[in-house]
Image (spheres, helix red, strand yellow):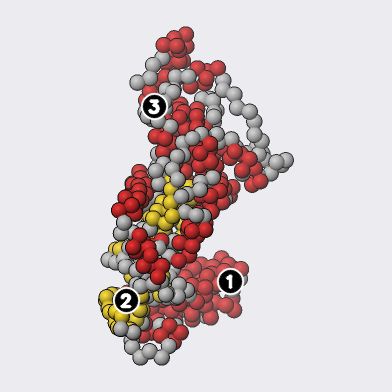
Amino acid sequence: MLRVEPKQFSMFSAAVYSRIPKDHMLKKIEEVIDFSFINELLADSYCSDFGRPAKEPELLMRLLFLKHIYDISDVQVIEQAALNIAWVWFLGLNLEDQLPHPSLLAKFRTQRLGEFALDDIIVEIISQCKEKGLVKTDGISVDATHIEANTIKKIPERIMKYLAQRIFKALKKDLGEIPPEIDTDIPDFNQIEDHKHAKEVMKQYLLQVIQQAEPFAGEKTHAAIAEAEGILADEKFIIQKGLRSLVDKDARIGRKSKDKPFYGYKAEYTMLADDRLITAVTVQSGEKTDGNNFAELLERTLEAGIKPQQVYGDKAYFRPDILAQIEKINAEPIIPVSESAYQINEELFSYNKDSDQWFCCMGNHTVKKKHCTRKKDGKDYEYYRFTFDKKQCVDCSHRAECMGKAKGKARILIVSLNTHKLWEYSQKQKTEAFKEAYKKRASIEWKNAELKRFLGLARATGYGLKAVATQAKLTAIAANLKRIIALAGAKAPALSNANCCRAIFSYFKAPVALASLRFA
C-alpha cells in the first residue's frame, strides 16, 4: 500500500543537516529538480487501500540515483547512506530512520519501475531544467555506445549440452527420476575435431532427447523442451549469429570495428549538443545497427519541450528515413554523407559504419570492398562492390531468395554513391559552415566516455534487454544530475563519511556546542 506522508525533520536531524555545505552536489541538485512527481508517476503500480505501507517510490528512486552517480552496488549504497549525512538528507529521512533493505531496490527495479517510467523521469528532469533556464541549446546530437554483456558467449555445442541437462533436471522434478528410456550419455563434443560435425552431432543428440522425453513430460519438462525447440528453430543459432548464452538470451555479437567484435548490447541516445543533457535513451541487442530507434528518441526529446534546430550525427544516421524525420520538424541535419546508404533492401541488409561492412538478415557480413567505375550513356558512374563471405553463402537456407539464379558462390552487393539527394548533401558538407557546425558532435563522444568510464555503463550489471535498458536509463539520469551542477554554475565538494560521523559523535558528546561544529 502506498501512503505518502509529509516529511518533517526532527530537531536533532535538522541541526546536523544545517551543517551540510550549501554548495554540496546533492543540495544543488535539490535546488534545481523537484522529485515529488515520482510518487504520482508510479502510484498506479501500488495498491492504495490494502497491504502493508510501502516505501515511497521517490525514496527508492533517490537511492537508485545515488547508486548510479557513484557507480556502486545496491548493498553499498545502503551501507554508505547509513554513514553519510548528506545522503540521508537527500533521501528525506531523519538520522534515526531505518533505511530499506538492499533487496528492496532489486524488487523495485523489476516489479515497480517500468521502462517507460524511466523515460518519463528523463523527460520531466529535462523539462524542469528548461523551465529554470538551464537549457539554452537548440541542437541535439545522436549516437550509440556498446555495452558488454554480463556473461561470456558460448559455442552452440555447449549450449545444446546445457539444454539437454535442463531437460534431465526437469524430468527429475516432474517424475522424481530420469526414465531409463532416455539416453543421458551426452557426447563429448570436445573430442570432435571438425567443429561443423560437432555441432551436427550435438543437434541430433538434443533432438533425440526431446523425442524421448516428450512421453514422460510434466509441466517443468514441457517448459524445458519448449525452450530447446525454440532455440533450435532459430537458423542463426547453429551458425553462431544468434543466441550465445542461456544466462542472457538477448545479448548478441556486434562490431566496434571491422576487427573488433563485442558481445552484448548497444545503447542509443540523444543529447543536447551544447548543454550535454541526455534527452532520451534506448537499448537494443548488439548486432543491430545505429539509427533504428531514432524516431523514438526524437519523440521523447520533443516531449521534453526541446525543439531542435540542428541534429548532429555520424554517417550511420545518413539514412532516408532519418533525414525525412529531421526535415519533418524543420531541423537541419548536420550529418556526413554515407555513400552506402541508398538503393538497399533494409529488410535483407544493414550497414555497420564502424566496420564499414554490410550484414545480411542471416548475420553474414562482407569481407571485401572494391571501388568500381562503369560507363553508361557516355557517362562514368561510380559504385562500391561488396562481397559477402562465401563460406556461409554456400550453405545459407535463404540463398535462392537472396541470390536468385546467380551462379557465384558469394552474394555481391552493388552500392551506388551517386543519387541526387546524396549529391546535394555531399556538396553541403564540403562548406566551411558545415565543417564548423559539425564540431559540436564531438561533445557526445565525451559523454560516451563519462557513461562508460565513470558511471559503469561499459558492462551490463544484469541479464536481458529489460535489465540493461533500465541500467542505461538510470545511468543517463545520473549523468544528467551531475551535469546540472555545472549548468547551475556551482562546484560540488563531497562531504566525507569520516566528517559526517565526526559531526554526529560530536553532537552526542557535547550537544550544547553544536553551533561550533565544523566540517573539513
Identify residue for label 1: 222
Residue 459 position within the rendered picture, expressed as x and y whole percent measured from the top left: 38, 53
Q: Is residue 228 above or below residue 485?
A: below
Q: Residue at x 49, y 68 (%)?
A: 166
Please identify the quadrant where the C terminus is shown. Answer: top left
Q: Which residue is mark 3?
A: 495
Q: Amino acid at mark 1?
A: His
Q: Tell me the crowding category of disc 1: few under 14, some 14 to 19, or many 20 or more residues within 10 angstroms, Cα based.
A: some
184 or 302, nearer to the observer: 302
Whether residue 308 is visible, yes or no, is yes
**Quadrant of the rendering where the N terminus is positioned:** top right
User: x%, y% of residue 316?
Assistant: 38, 62
Q: Is residue 61 left or right of residue 397?
A: right
What amino acid type should be assigned to the residue bearing mark 3? Answer: Leu
Tag 2, which secondary structure?
Answer: strand
Q: Nearer the viewer, mark 2 or mark 1?
A: 2
**Of the two numbered discs 3 and 1 in the rendering, the one whose residue sits closer to the viewer:** 3
Q: Residue at x 59, y 24 (%)?
A: 8
Q: Residues within 10 Å of mark 3 (few under 14, many from 20)?
A: some
Residue 152 found in image quarter = bottom left
Q: Position of residue 343 (x, y in %)?
A: 42, 75
Marks 2/1: CA distance? 53 Å
The residue identified by callout 2 is 383
Q: Is residue 307 or residue 256 the one in the foreground?
A: 307
- The x, y position of residue 42, in whole percent, is 61, 44
Q: CA distance from mark 3 to mark 2?
A: 61 Å
Judging depth in this view, the residue of 22 and 327 nearest the camera is 327
The amino acid type found where label 2 is placed reads Tyr
Which comes before the other along the chain, label 2 or label 1?
A: 1
